[in-house]
Amino acid sequence: MMAEPEVRIINSAGEDRGDVEMQGGEDLEIAETGAGEVPEGDETINVDKPSSRTPKFVHYLKSPIITLTVGSGDSQTTLTAHQALLIASPYFASAIAADSRNPNRVIDLVTEDLEATSAVLEYLYTGEYFPHKISSTSLQSDPSIPPVDHTGEQLLKHAKVYTLAEKLGMPQLRTLAHSKIHLVDSNAVAELVYARYVYSNTSKDDITIRKPVATFWGQRSHVLRHETEGTFRELCLQYPEFGFDVLNFVLDAEERREERKRKTMAAEDVGTASTRKRTRG
């Protein structure tokens, strides 16, 4: 029995984009970081060169179209995407497999955010979502939004992509969204809106996103709480875990300061004792 071919996707920086597994027919599996080629045999693909990517992308475009219904009621929106791209997500792959005999497959995302879902699809097709991360310290400029987030809207955009990526089983997108959160300039009000979302929509065990929030407020709460006009207190009462995490950070920091202080005093005592001993001699 022949082994299934393995495809490695390499970007222009020489970074490995992950494996692409093939099972034949319509059940194509691709790397979660976006689209690539599905050739026969082992091959390395540079997805950043249109000349090599364009003629091969047709393999994905030939796969069945899946309908996604996002939201509910009057705000419900219908999106479509190619199956070969969607199955990079274990969540989507499972939903598609469960309804494999239906030629008009529909996946309902009634509780999901439209902008976050659009960002997921953009990522599956291109390997990024707007605004792009252009360096480790900056995001692509967006003239339609203010340079500083005063409402939490910019922070929430990436936070919602983060939580949706978690649900869809897309860890690389989750990591990308989290990194973008920390590149948004914001004020205290926006940070509280963001903190409320995090503690409302993530697991208490998700220290990846919760710990930086608690650290931020633990370091600045003595100043920023005066700028939030009681909202900080309300958040602590509504989400005791938030208040505890912030308090825990403050107490840990105080404990470390006390420990450093004790070590400094002990070192000074040793130095004084040594000096006295030499003087006596």
Image (cartoon, rainbow, N blue to C red):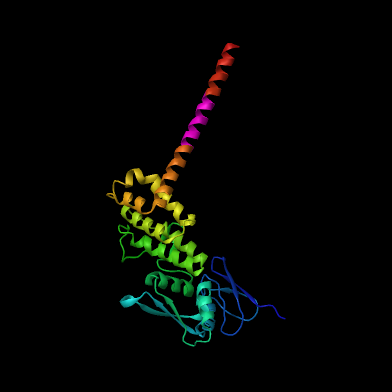
Q: Is residue 20 left or right of residue 230?
A: right
The quarter in which the N terminus is drawn is bottom right
Query: Whole-percent x and y of residue 168?
Result: 49, 70
* In the image, residue 147 lies in the stretch drawn in magenta: no
Give the quarter of the image for residue 220. top left
Q: Position of residue 182 (x, y in %)?
A: 42, 56
Q: Over which residues does the magenta segment extend?
A: 256-268
Above or below — where is 113 with respect to 137?
below
> In the drawing, does residue 228 fall left or right of residue 156?
left
Q: Residue at x 30, y 61 (%)?
A: 146
Left or right, 22 with reference to 82? right
Relative to 166, residue 238 above or below: above
In the displayed image of the protein, which residue is found farthest to the top? 280
Pick out the residue farthest to the left: 229
Return the residue nearer the eye: 211 or 242: 242
Q: What secondary structure prevails in the magenta region?
A: helix
| Rendered location of residue 96, percent (x, y) | 51, 80
Residue placed most toward the observer, 211 or 180: 211
Instruction: Give the camera-side residue of 234 and 229.
Output: 234
Q: Name the residue rendered at 44%, 52% in the picture.
A: 212
| Viewer can see residue 50 | no
Q: Is residue 242 left or right of residue 276?
A: left
Residue in the image at 39% along x and 59% along y? 200
Q: Position of residue 120 (x, y in %)?
A: 45, 71
